[in-house]
Amino acid sequence: MNYQRPELRRALAADYAIGLMPLTARRRFEHLMLDDAALRLELAQWQETLSTLTAPLEEQTAPEHVWPAIVARIEPQRLHVPEKRSFWNWMRITAVACSLIVVIGLGVLYNRDTINYRATLTADNQQPALNVQAHARYLNVEAVNVAAVESGRSLELWAIPADGVPVSLGVLPNDGKGRVELSEAQQKLITTPTILAITLEPQGGSPTGKPTGPVLYKGALAAL
Amino acid sequence: MNGITADGSRAQPGLTCDQVAKPHGRYLHLVWRNTIPSVDTDELGQLLAQCSLGNRRAFETLYRTASSRLFAVALRCMGRRALAEEVLQEAFVRIWHNASRYDANLSKPMTWMINITRNLAIDQLRRHREEPLSDEQAQALFDESPSAHDQLDSDRQASELQRCLDKLEGMQRQSIITAYFHGISHADLATQLAAPLGSVKSWIRRGMERLRRCLES
């Protein structure tokens, strides 16, 4: 077809304007209009003509609710975004809180290290010599004022439960500072009213399993 | 090439008498602006320009000014208020987003907005109209037209326009109005009017030409 024929252009534009063009022809016409200002003008004139068909219509006031609905459609950022943002904030805070709880929980599980008992061991003169912190699986011994230990001797730590039979908890370093791991049997002894005591033993600890030397320091366990 | 020029002002050889006699282009456009009464075109044009810059206040003013006219168009097309409200809402959303594409040199603001509204309406109608119209539906469509035609808004009772509409023969007016407001195809029109397809086509084509020439004269 020769789309430059004025009567054809006018007829096509008329069909397009009133809406009586099949879909494929419509697409072709729209494509033609892209580079053809005169064709766009031709169509605009038809549309102007046809719009006069609406002139006799009596104006109808639109219901009140239409305008708010339009505003809601064109301003989604004002109506929806704050909601969305608060939702995401809430999500973020929750996520951070959950992570913290998980991290702390795991930390507590892996490092459950609370001190259950404490004892201050004193010398005969009632001066504090050592502090003992009893954790679940070990004792932490801190020297406060420990007399020097002569060579060839060791300090041995004992638990003396209510029945009075001392159980060895192990040999301490000579400076009195150290960590004493507890066996399960030993762990059961670490409770009130057990008394902790340190004796002076031959190097490496009592050979008999019972205290053989003098008690240098002692003190009762106290629950925290 | 022997096509019309950009402003269409050059008379073409080989045209029918009517077409040669008609002025084209911008001159014609100016004549038109005087023949069709409507809400103040300049004001609407400025509002649309403001809308294209994102001015919400201008958009609200545009709505207050134009919505009753466009709602009347939507109602005329859809026939039911609920459907017409949806079309009106969609139309204004589109007007807002496409305001920058309005070309003042091409069409009047109200025409542009009526087109958007009417296109949305007939798209809706065609979507709902999967099957050909039943006789009752079609009859309802045609029954509307004379009464709507007679209901002239007194403010806009332009005698010129009325004269041009009156010039159309009954069948011409009926088929044009039905096609325009309801998007009925040639074939469906032919079925409903119990007329040959060729007759329907020629009623519409001649009717449109007559209307356009009358408005241009």
Image (tube, coloured by chain):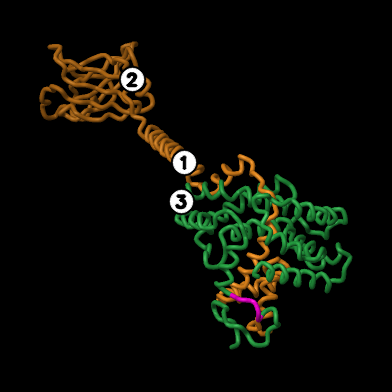
Chain colours: A orange, B green
User: Magenta segment, principal secondary structure?
Assistant: loop
Query: What residue sits 61% from the left and 39% below the top?
Result: A64
Tell me residue A33's x, y (percent): 59, 74
Residue B123 appears in the rendering: no
Query: What residue sits 65% from the left and 81% below the top?
Result: B20
Which residues lie in the magenta part? B20-24
Tell me residue A189's x, y (percent): 35, 19
Asked if both marks, 1 and 2, belong to the same chain, the answer given is yes
Name the residue beneath numbered marker 1.
A82
Query: What residue sits 70% from the left and 56% below the top?
Result: B124
Distance CA(mark 1)–CA(mark 3) = 22 Å
Q: Nearer the viewer, mark 1 or mark 2?
A: 1
State whether residue A71 is above or below residue A37: above
Tell me residue B162's x, y (percent): 71, 59
Residue B6 appears in the rendering: yes
Distance CA(mark 2)–CA(mark 3) = 80 Å
For numbered disc 2, what is the local secondary structure? Answer: loop
**Which one is nearer the viewer's eye here, B49 or A141?**
B49
Name the residue beneath numbered marker 3.
B55
Query: Which quarter of the picture shows residue A102?
Result: top left
Q: The residue under label 3 is which amino acid type?
A: Asn
State whether residue A144 is above or below residue B212: above
Of callouts 1 and 2, the N-terminal one:
1
For numbered disc 1, what is the local secondary structure? Answer: helix
Residues tagged 1 and 2 counted as in contact (Cβ below 8 A)? no
